[in-house]
Image (cartoon, rainbow, N blue to C red):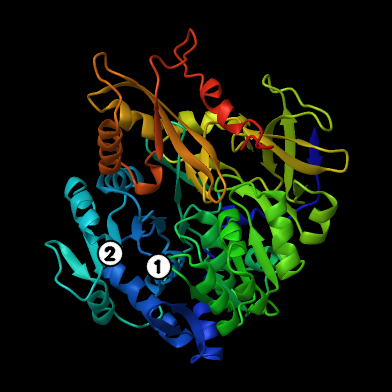
Amino acid sequence: MRARRGAGGSALAYGSVMAELIAGWATANPGGAALVDERGTITWAQFDDRVNRLINGLRDAGLQPGDTFAVMCGNQHEFFEASAASAHGGWTMVPVNWHWVADELAYVLEDSGATALIVDVRWLEVAVEACARVPSVTTRIAVTDGPLPDGFISYEELLASASPAEPADQERGGPMFYTSGTTGFPKGVRSGLTHPGGPVSTTTGLAEVFLDLFGVPKRGVTLLCGPVYHSAQWVFSMLPLAVGSTVVMQHQFDPAALLDLIERFQVTNTHLVPTQFVRLLKLSDEVRADFDASSLVSVVHGAAPCPPEVKKAMIIWWGPKIVEYYGGTEGGFISLIGSEEWLDHRGSVGRVLPIVEVTITDDDGHPLGPNETGQIWFRSLLGNDFEYHNAPEKTAEAHLAPGVGTLGDVGFLDEDGYLYMADRKIDMIISGGVNIYPAEIEAVLVGHPKVVDAAVFGIPHDEMGEEVKAAVQLVPGVEPSSALFAELTSYAREHLAGYKVPRSIDIHPELPRNEAGKLQKRTLRDRYWQDTGRSI
């Protein structure tokens, strides 16, 4: 079935939109708070000055328009300064997952062609090891007051030595997010609007359209409480900042502290994932009853399926302020649904946005009718598309035709044009709103000398949605034991970020594969999902 409506813009595909707005806000509200992190407040005047210095400092270090730099920082003001610098300098910025180990960071630095890295002191050891393997990263900047490793310079010293003047010859830049693929290492996602170049002001109007779409107030107070290296968290903090919103940050999610931040700063909008809903709802009745949600205008959620009872409980508690979307880094926002509409269409992820055309097809690519389940394909009516950096074959696999892409999901459209998710065609695991792809984990497990084959999949978890489960086939003569489980887990932790490490491991005499050698994971995972009322 195909749904098509109107015209507009694809928000997750937008490039960086700060443009010249920093100077405008610094003039209009110099002492007002632009950024509030766990170390203090950066005013608009300070933000303007620091971004100018960072742009000029990076230029002095040799970065040219079109170059790429990576940022491995937490939810902190330096990340936003770097993102704004990218927007003005015509650079591609790669936000780095701070859970990555050196292998993962080194791969992305090399694959992206990054010539510079900005890293917070918390991950400096990982960065030193990764940069030693990627000599093309010649500009290495550390956010630290302590000793600097060889080859690194201080972030604050770079700013202090650079000119505070408004940079000349500004060009639009934007982020390239890395999203894990179904095989191997993560892939960089590029869209037409995130390629650097052109006037920095071109996407300003699109930011305002986007905020209106989600009911996010201009010049409000935005709360960031998820990792800003995720595209959705970046969008729902950078775009409000672009139109004068204060951004308050929580680096490590804490449900009780989040409620305190909302009340203390009179937060108007935030982005959450279903796991955070669950943890908020588990707070004591007294804490929940004492919370004043009156400042909130828009609470957006996405990134993972939300249990209907959890969502209903949040609407009852906070009021009809909950807005859900379906989309991803590749496709931007595809559908949208507000609280009251959702109560009439429980389980739906909304109506297709005016700027998108959605088609549901069978396995042969033939369009299906209403309520027929198949693969979900999308096409931007603005002509935007995406590609995977340095991976043309993966780009082709994610397209039905030029401009018609997929996130690998399965679902259906009803007679009224509401989109419903049924399953994921790919094997991706979503745990706590984070995408985890099994092939990378399987490759690590099979690298252990006692493992001959491995399958990784998601099983139900009440709070996180899913957790990582592994099934392995051992080398003949190796016996299962608790010591072996600890050995395999420790081995995986050496090569993978912690959230990717299997929480449990089953031993099988042989793993199910078809004649072509493809793992039949469904036969392994189905028994864990029986009687749960859901398949993802």
Q: Position of residue 418 (x, y in %)?
A: 80, 44
Is residue 268 visible to the viewer in this orientation of the structure?
A: yes
The CA span between labels 2 and 1 is 14 Å
Tag 1 secondary structure:
helix
Nearest the viewer among 476 and 385 is 476
Please tell me which residue is depicted at 47% across the width and 19% down the height of the picture: 519
Q: Position of residue 386 (x, y in %)?
A: 55, 42
Vertical comparison of 410 with 240: above or below: above
Please tell me which residue is depicted at 70% across the width and 73% down the height of the picture: 297
Q: Point out the tag, 2 or 1, that comes first from the N-terminus.
A: 1
Residue type at numbered disc 2? Arg
* Badge 1 density bin: few <14, some 14–19, many ≥20, Cα 10 Å: many
Nearest the viewer among 226 and 173 is 226
Q: Residue furthest left?
A: 150
Label at residue 79: 1
The C terminus lies in which quarter of the figure?
Answer: top right
Please tell me which residue is depicted at 79% across the width and 27% down the height of the picture: 368
Q: Quadrant of residue 377?
A: top right
Q: Residue furthest bottom?
A: 31
Label at residue 122: 2
In front of the other: label 2 or label 1? 2
Relative placement, left or right, of 38 versus 123 is right
